[in-house]
Every structure is written in structure tokens, then in C-alpha cells.
Image (spheres, rainbow, N blue to C red):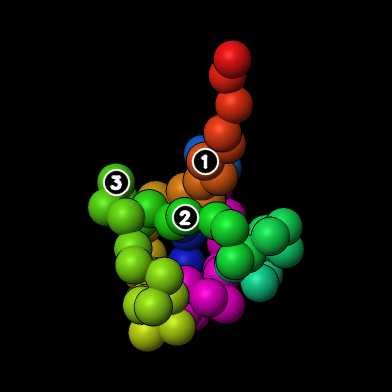
Amino acid sequence: MAKVIVNGEEQDISLPVSLIELIRQNQVSQPDMVSVQINGIFIVREKYEETIVKEGDEVDFLYFMGGGR
């Protein structure tokens, strides 16, 4: 098991795991609308399947919401 930080919380995951699989494992709602950062770097959506999460990575699932007046 490897430790990664997902949205600020430590998780134990089995490696290797692709970013798209980590999204599935975390049951991310609206996966088509989520942006992802690994270690502070945004990952292009087309690269989610080929991006491999590594031990110690910090992964953030981000949603950008419109709003205001």
C-alpha cells in the first residue's frame, strides 16, 4: 500500500493506479466536470488515463463554480 494525500486527507492505495482510476475509487461526483491537480500542477483531462499516481503525491479534485451578482 502507498500513501497519497487526496483533498487534504491521507489515503492508502494500491499501486500502480491511474488518475482516472483514483477518480473512480474516490467516487468523484461529476467526473466530467472536475479539474485535477497533482502536487500543485493541473493535469490535462486527456491525460487522466495515462497519468500514474505515485507514493506521496498530493491530489486535489477541484470544481469551479460560477456565481456572483
Mark 1 Cα-neighbour bin, 10 Å: few <14, some 14–19, many ≥20: few
Residue interval drawn in magenta? 10-22
Placement of the C terminus among the 4 image quadrants? top right
Please tell me in which quadrant of the rendered image residue 51 appears. Answer: bottom left
Q: Which residue is mark 1?
A: 64
* Mark identifier at residue 31: none
Does residue 25 show up magenta in the picture? no
Closer to the N terminus: mark 1 or mark 3?
Answer: 3
Q: Which residue is mark 3?
A: 40
Q: Is residue 1 visible?
A: no
From this viewpoint, which residue is outermost toward the top? 69
Residue type highlighted by circle 2: Ser
Image position, residue 4 (x, y; %):
46, 56
Assess whether mark 2 and mark 1 are in contact (beta carbons under 8 angstroms). Answer: yes
Spatial CA distance of label 1 from label 3 is 16 Å
Q: From the image, state whether disc 2 or disc 3 is nearer to you.
A: 2
Label 1: state its secondary structure.
loop
